[in-house]
Image: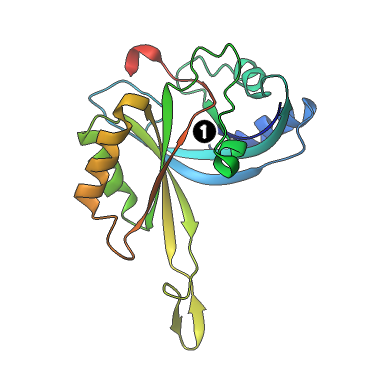
Amino acid sequence: MIKLVLNYIIVNQGNASKVLSYAKSLGLKGGTILLAHGTINNSILKILNLNENKKDVLMIAEIIDGSKSKLKEIADYFHFEKPNYGMGFNICINQMAKKEMCYSEGDVKMNKYELIYVIVNKGFGEDVVDAAQKAGSSGATIINARGSSVHETSKIFSIEIEPEKEIVLMIVKSEMKDQICQAIIKDTKITDPGKGVLFTQSINEVYGLYQDNL
């Protein structure tokens, strides 16, 4: 079965170009690099290999025909098994579009992790992380972004100003997803109009997580 996946690779700032170059050598066509920063609950060891520093988030789409993605080769080459070297995961875009399941055959990690994806106004990303940590999440990646809609765009001297956003990415165990989402909703009132957006997505493959720290 042909599958379309979106690979997310999180590395220390400045390293994404190296990862992208290697990915191209494997036959991948290109990707998008986003600037972000990591956050971690100091009472728990690192779940996402992230601490309070700047990160690059590399997004690469890939078509898979009956085999695993190139993500494992990238993870092995850049030693994601070592702390603070990086991490990678992917989600199946087929699943998002058609409600199909597309886990890699033989992948023991399949269906064990969920991606929680939260979009909020700038400055509120840390509130999301704090709420999630109280419910058991151990770390997150916050990406700076910008939103635009008829309800959000304001004007200064007749110039449209698009409000800045923060995208919070968290990988959690599947059985913890509901309690973490409910904690975020309760503490941040994200379901109120204009507060933000929250959704989840099953993880297809993941590398760079430490089983003992979950």
* Colour scheme of the picture: rainbow
Q: Quadrant of the C terminus?
A: top left
Residue 54, percent from left and from top:
46, 40
Q: Please identify the quadrant where the N terminus is shown.
A: top right
Residue at 33% across, 56% down: 123
Tell me: 79 left or right of 65. left
Residue lying furthest front in this view?
99
Q: Nearer the viewer, residue 146 or 192?
A: 192
* Residue 198 visible from this viewpoint: yes
Question: At 70% from the left edge and 19% from the top edge, which residue is drawn?
Answer: 67
> Relative to 72, is 19 above or below?
below
Residue 107 placement (x, y as % from top left): 55, 14
| Residue 130 in view, yes or no | no
For image coordinates 29% across by 35% down, the residue present is 178
Q: Please count the marks in the image.
A: 1
Residue drawn at 33 percent across, 32 percent down: 177
Looking at the picture, how far across and down is residue 37, in whole percent? 43, 42
Label 1 sits on residue: 12
Where's residue 126, x and y in %? Answer: 30, 47
Q: Is residue 66 left or right of residue 12?
A: right
185 sits to left or right of 32: left
Query: Depth check: 191 or 72 in front?
Result: 191
Q: Secondary structure at mark 1?
A: strand
Q: Disc 1 marks which amino acid? A: Asn
Residue 135: which quarter of the image? top left
Residue 98: name its quadrant: top right
Question: Are there few (<14), some (14-19), or many (20+) residues within 10 Å of tag 1?
Answer: many
Residue 30 location, quadrant:
top right
In this view, which residue lies farthest toward the bottom? 157
